[in-house]
Image (tube, rainbow, N blue to C red):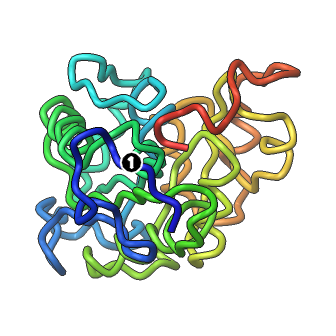
């Protein structure tokens, strides 16, 4: 694979070309499901990290720069109160580009867990766009790995993200995707999304409706995206 190591890093630290990084307890989510609440609830909700759960700081390896997105804390809390396991699925190509180390990715993960409480699973792709892995979104590998770790069926899982790659990865995995547009979301991504929400709390409410009902898209259209992106997609640390 094409890997430019961080200065001082050994070749052994290069990410495997086909393997995502996973954190979490296999087959057992730490979020206890509320008795009698299983019904039509989803089995898991997986969030993109940068631009979805936390502000997108390009190639961020500094925990001090982690800041939750609006309503993100409330959305995660609401899911936990229902007993729905929550996870994070994130592209971190800065590792392959030599701009981040595994330790820095882990430090940011720990800070996110401090702010939100520990997530039940983390699935991170450390590869670059040309590495040919199966986990870099829009490939389905991160969603499938997270679902397997949680013991959740992809068809009963919702993936929430801010760009088209997030919802395309959900579709490829057989999961349900909800797009939460931001100023860097492309208009064509919004148009192509099956379901959108104006913020994460609205996305969580939308997840409580049966897939395909259309209830959430009409009620929560989200902000109108600008005609151009604020930055190239390759710049973001989670892209």
Looking at the image, residue 164 sits to the left or right of residue 59; the answer is right
- The spot of residue 230 in percent (x, y) is 70, 18
- Frontmost residue, 140 versus 75: 140
The residue depicted at 59 percent of the width and 78 percent of the height is 174
- The spot of residue 94 in percent (x, y) is 44, 42
Residue 135's place in the image compared with 205, above or below, is below
Residue 80's place in the image compared with 220, above or below, is below
The residue depicted at 15 percent of the width and 39 percent of the height is 110
Disc tally is 1
Q: Which quadrant holds residue 132?
A: bottom right
- The spot of residue 194 in percent (x, y) is 75, 56
Q: Which quadrant holds residue 75?
A: top left
Looking at the image, residue 46 sits to the left or right of residue 84; the answer is right
The residue depicted at 16 percent of the width and 78 percent of the height is 26
The residue labelled by disc 1 is: 95
- The spot of residue 127 in percent (x, y) is 47, 59
Residue 188's place in the image compared with 199, above or below, is below
Image quadrant in which the C terminus is located: top right
- Frontmost residue, 52 versus 136: 136
Q: Which quadrant holds residue 87?
A: bottom left
The residue depicted at 81 percent of the width and 19 percent of the height is 226
**Disc 1 crowd, CA 10 A, few/some/many (<14, 14-19, 20+):** many
Mark 1 residue element: loop
């Amino acid at each position: 694979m094409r890997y430019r190591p961080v200065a001082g890093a050994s070749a052994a630290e290069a990410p495997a070309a086909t393997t995502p990084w996973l954190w979490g307890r296999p087959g057992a989510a730490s979020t206890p499901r509320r008795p009698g609440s299983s019904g039509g609830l989803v089995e898991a909700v997986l969030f993109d990290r940068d631009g979805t759960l936390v502000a997108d700081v390009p190639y961020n390896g500094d925990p001090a720069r982690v800041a939750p997105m609006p309503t993100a804390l409330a959305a995660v809390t609401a899911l936990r109160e229902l007993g729905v396991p929550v996870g994070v699925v994130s592209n971190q190509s800065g590792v392959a580009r030599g701009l981040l180390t595994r330790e820095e990715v882990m430090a940011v993960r720990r800070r996110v867990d401090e702010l939100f409480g520990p997530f039940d699973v983390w699935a991170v792709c450390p590869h670059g766009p040309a590495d040919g892995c199966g986990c870099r979104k829009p490939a389905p590998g991160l969603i499938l790995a997270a679902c397997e770790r949680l013991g959740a069926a992809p068809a009963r899982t919702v993936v929430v993200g801010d760009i088209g790659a997030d919802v395309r990865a959900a579709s490829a995995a057989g999961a349900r995707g909800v797009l939460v547009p931001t100023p860097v979301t492309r208009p064509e991504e919004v148009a192509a999304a099956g379901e959108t929400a104006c913020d994460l709390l609205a996305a969580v409410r939308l997840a409580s409706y049966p897939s395909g009902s259309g209830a959430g898209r009409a009620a929560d259209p989200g902000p109108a995206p600008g005609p151009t992106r604020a930055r190239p997609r390759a710049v973001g640390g989670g892209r």
